[in-house]
Image (tube, grey):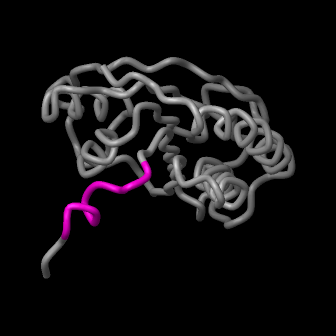
């Protein structure tokens, strides 16, 4: 299969990449993919913003980060009270040898992008407090409400971001 340059490098420059990750079959662990899916629907007319979902972050995501000057990593967290949100700025962080597995932390993924490609996007973690991580394919009521509010809030800001350029370090 042959690829043209436009297949590899999109004609519309990407300004924001959203990666919502977690397991949608573990109730609130699906909060990240749920928010990313809601955002993808809200931002479908914005070609400068891409929303992806994944069960976990993997090394293959490093190249995707190369093409976006801003990245949001959205995931459920047991370290945040249920239904609440914590947003943190992320910086690249080299993993310890015993933590370099198939599942990666966002900071490790940023570090890999920096080491492999010499650049790293501005990045934030959006952690959504999980109430229930049992087997199930529906978010708890509190987390579902938070995901709806968060996606509306982020859609507004991502629309603004996607129309303004950002510097990639």
In the displayed structure image, the side of residue 89 where residue 33 appears, left or right? right
Of residue 27 and residue 126, the one placed in the foreground of this image is: 126
User: Is residue 23 placed above or below 85 in the rendered structure?
Assistant: below
Check the image and report above or below for 123 versus 46.
above
Instruction: Indicate left or right for 31 with 91 as reference.
Output: right
Q: Is residue 135 above or below residue 17?
A: below
Residue in front for this viewpoint, 146 or 15: 15
Q: Which residues are magenta?
A: 4-12
Q: Quadrant of residue 149?
A: top right
Q: Position of residue 25 (x, y in %)?
A: 59, 64
Residue in the picture at 49% in, 47% down? 19
The residue depicted at 16 percent of the width and 34 percent of the height is: 117
Q: Residue at x 76, y 29 (%)?
A: 84
Does the stretch in magenta take in 10? yes
Quarter of the figure with the C terminus: top left
Question: Which quarter of the image is occupied by the N terminus?
Answer: bottom left
Q: Position of residue 35 (x, y in %)?
A: 67, 50
Q: In the current view of this chain or complex, which residue is farthest to the bottom?
A: 1
Q: How many badges with numbers are in the image?
A: 0
Front-most of residues 37 and 106 = 37
Residue 33: x and y, percent?
59, 54
Q: Is residue 39 left or right of residue 99?
A: right
């Amino acid at each position: 299969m042959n690829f043209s340059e436009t297949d590899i490098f999109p004609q519309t420059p990407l300004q924001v990449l959203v990666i919502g990750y977690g397991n949608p079959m573990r109730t609130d662990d699906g909060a990240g993919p749920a928010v990313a899916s809601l955002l993808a629907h809200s931002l479908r007319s914005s070609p400068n913003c891409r929303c992806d979902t994944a069960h976990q972050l993997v090394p293959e995501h490093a190249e995707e980060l190369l093409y976006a000057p801003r990245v949001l990593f959205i995931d459920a967290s047991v370290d945040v009270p249920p239904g609440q949100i914590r947003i943190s700025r992320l910086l690249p962080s080299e993993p310890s040898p015993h933590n370099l597995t198939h599942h990666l932390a966002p900071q490790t993924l940023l570090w890999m992008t920096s080491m492999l490609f010499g650049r790293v996007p501005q990045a934030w973690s959006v952690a959504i407090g999980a109430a229930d991580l049992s087997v199930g394919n529906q978010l708890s009521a509190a987390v579902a409400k938070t995901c709806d509010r968060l996606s509306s809030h982020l859609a507004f800001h991502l629309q603004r971001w996607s129309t303004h350029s950002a510097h990639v370090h």
